[in-house]
Amino acid sequence: MRLLLIRHGRTASNVGRLLDTGHPGAPLDDTGLSQAQALVAALAEEPIEAVFTSDLTRARQTGAPLAAALGVPVRELPGLREIYAGDEDMSPDWNPYVAVLDSWFDDPTNSLPNGENAVVFLDRFDKAVAEIAAAGVECAALVSHGAALRVWVPARAANLKPGAARAWRLDNTDVIIADGDPTSGWRISKWADQDIE
C-alpha cells in the first residue's frame, strides 16, 4: 500500500516556537487552514481512499478538507499523536526535547520527565499504522506531526537509516511518500521536495 504521511498545517504554537505536544493542542491559524485546503489540489493525482489523522486538533483540521473533497470521513487515531514532551510541554526551549530524541539511538528508554520514550512512541505509532493497513485500502493519507514523522519514518523505512531525517526540512503540510506494509516494511520515495533513492 501507499502511505502519504503529512505534517499538519501551521499553528500559533509553530509561529511562537512553542513545544506543543499535548492534547488537544493548538488549532490551525489562518495560514494553516489555507495550507490544509491547498492539500486537496496538491494531492489530487494520488488515489487516496482514506484519511487518518491524530486526534490533536491541528491534525484533524488538516485532514478535514482532503477528506471532504474525497467524500470520506476523517478517522482519528490517537496513536498518530506527536511525541509527548511531558513536563516540557509548551516550553519555548526545544533543546531538552531534541536532546532526548537524539539520545534514543543509544537509549530508547530515555525520556523527559513525564514524557514518552522511544519504546512507547514507536509501539503506539506502529499500532496506528497497522490499523490503517488493516483497513484494506491501497492508498491512505496520514496526518501526523513533525517530531513523530522524523523519528518513525527513518526507524521503519528500509531505505533510510535511523536519524537520517535529522537535518531534512519538514515544513507544515509537507508530504512523505511511503510504499510497503507493516510486515515487509516501507520504502520512502519522497520526503517533502526531495526524491529518495
Image (cartoon, rainbow, N blue to C red):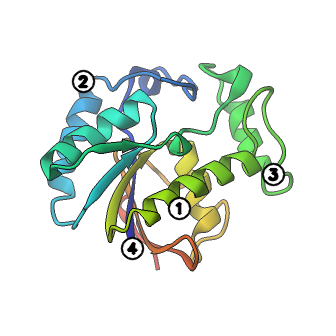
In the rendered structure, the answer to whether residue 72 lies left or right of residue 168 reads left
Mark 2 or mark 1, earlier in chain: 2
| Mark 2 secondary-structure assignment | helix
Which class describes the residues within 10 Å of circle 1: few (<14), some (14-19), or many (20+)? some
Residue 136, above or below 109: below
* Residue type of the residue flagged with mark 2: Asp
In this rendering, the label closer to the viewer, 4 or 3 = 4
Residue at image position (57%, 25%) is 22
Q: Quadrant of residue 55?
A: top left
Mark 3 or mark 1, earlier in chain: 3
In this rendering, the label closer to the viewer, 1 or 4 = 1
In this rendering, the label closer to the viewer, 3 or 1 = 1
The residue that label 4 is drawn on is 1
| Mark 3 secondary-structure assignment | loop
| Mark 4 secondary-structure assignment | loop
Residue at image position (63%, 19%) is 91
The residue that label 3 is drawn on is 108
* Alpha-carbon span between mark 2 and mark 1: 33 Å
Mark 2 or mark 3, earlier in chain: 2
The residue that label 1 is drawn on is 130
* Alpha-carbon span between mark 1 and mark 4: 12 Å
* Alpha-carbon span between mark 4 and mark 2: 33 Å
The residue that label 2 is drawn on is 30
* Alpha-carbon span between mark 2 and mark 3: 37 Å
- In this view, which residue lies farthest toward the front? 135
